[in-house]
Image (tube, rainbow, N blue to C red):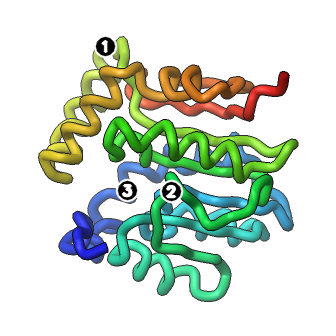
Amino acid sequence: MTNDPYRRIARFYDTVVEPFNASLRKYVLKVARPKEGMKVLEVGCGTGANLDLFARAGCEVSGIDLSPSMMEIAQRKLGDRADLRVGDASSMPFDDGSFDLVVAFLTLHEMPADVRAPVVSEMARVVGEDGRLLLIDFHQGPYSFPKGWLYRSVIVPIEIGAGLEHFKNHRDFLSRKGLPGLIAGNGLEVEKERLLAGGTMMVSVARPRTS
């Protein structure tokens, strides 16, 4: 775990990136409707900003992320209010059906193409029979004018700034139809779906398809 791409930027992440996510995060909480005692897992939890909000709402929260640097900040932020693991989300250390809600917030586009489907499969494995997956990520368009193109003009520099490998994965994610492609390829059933920010973001609520 020595190759941590967030090692240098982790301490600045909340200051630089989180302001752009604030309105999206508020919408996510409306969709997720956290309840006291709800068991929530976030894949790619980063600095724990989402988990902090769920914990404040009385949820039992867990998070997994590959970056030790980001998880160190999340641990300081959440303390003993969360079960945080540094690890690979394509092979998670959680039992089948452990969670009521499993979240991936602007995470899947960062992953290499061969990792995304196994991660979504694992998310489906650990969610309970009556649970849901909440997937939020970039959308391939078309984008509305001018709002969508304005958002895109901000998103692209941020993604490039995260590193060439990151941006390569971002472009590959969009070329493969983003969330709709992953959902269709993993046998999930969409319950709710909405485009935000001029078509640059998609929010999907899904569950494993029942035969």
> In the drawing, what numbered circle is on residue 89?
2
The residue nearer to you, when weighing 6 against 128, is 128
Three-letter amino acid code at disc 1? Phe
Assign a secondary structure to mark 3. Answer: helix
Question: Where is residue 13 drawn, in percent x and y?
Answer: 30, 66
The amino acid at mark 3 is Pro
- Residues 30 and 207: in front is 207
The vertical placement of 167 against 142, above or below, is: below
| In the image, residue 102 above or below residue 40 | above
Quadrant assignment for the C terminus: top right
Residue 158 in sight in this render: no
Compared to 119, does 206 lie above or below?
above
Q: Residue at horizontal 40%, vertical 65%?
A: 66
Quadrant location of the N terminus in the rendered image: bottom left
Inspect this view and state whether residue 13 appears. yes
Circle 3 residues within 10 Å: few <14, some 14–19, many ≥20: few
What residue do we see at 13% from left, 46% from top?
164
SS state under label 1: loop
Nearest to N terminus: mark 1 or mark 2:
2
Give the percent coordinates (x, y) of residue 131: 80, 45
Height in image: 86 above or below 16?
below
Can you identify the residue that label 1 sits on? 145
